[in-house]
Amino acid sequence: MTDQVLIEALRVDTVIGVYEWEKTIQQTLVIDVVMDCDNRPAAEQDNIDLAVDYARVSDAITELLQAQPRQLIETVAEDIAKLVLQQFAVRQVQVKVAKPAAVAAAQQVAVRISRQANEYQ
Ligand SMILES: Nc1nc2c(c(=O)[nH]1)N=C([C@H](O)[C@@H](O)CO)CN2
């Protein structure tokens, strides 16, 4: 089974960066999340309560990232993976965190990770 729910290019403004000047401003992160889950129960009953609700996940990620400053986009990716796997019925998650304004000559820079629910038990 290869069911997935995806969130693509979720934009979140937050305090992010290792340099002192970055700790005083908001910058935009762009988040992609791919969640491996079983979509059949929700589809069979046409019931949002049985689905991995991408709106709820998006809201939870935004709230998480705006709750505190972080230095590294690696930390952002790990914190998102942990939230998704601990709070939603997801077996495995891939998280990409891009920081479009970080390197002027690059369209964007990013990190990508994959984590499984059993890593957090
Ligand atoms: N692998 C990483 N490299 C860098 C990061 C990061 O989060 N992960 N961050 C910075 C600075 O904050 C940079 O974005 C400022 O422009 C540098 N390298």
Image: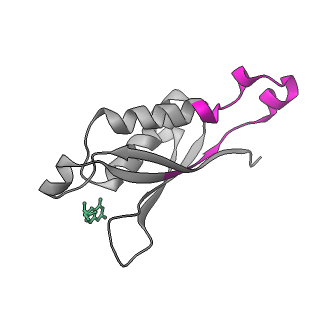
Whether residue 106 is situated above or below residue 66 in the rendered picture: below
Q: In the visual, does 63 lie left or right of 118? A: left
Q: In the visual, does 90 lie left or right of 47? A: left
Q: In the visual, does 120 lie left or right of 2? A: left
- Residue 47 part of the magenta-drawn span: yes
Give percent across and percent down for residue 11.
Answer: 48, 48
Of 48 and 20, nearer the camera is: 20
Of 39 and 20, nearer the camera is: 20
Q: Residue at x 60, y 33 (%)?
A: 55
Q: Point out the residue furthest to the front here.
A: 25
Q: In the visual, does 36 lie left or right of 113? A: right
Q: Point out the residue furthest to the left here.
A: 20
Q: Residue at x 85, y 22 (%)?
A: 45
Magenta stretch? 31-55
Q: Residue at x 37, y 39 (%)?
A: 65
Of 38 and 29, nearer the camera is: 29
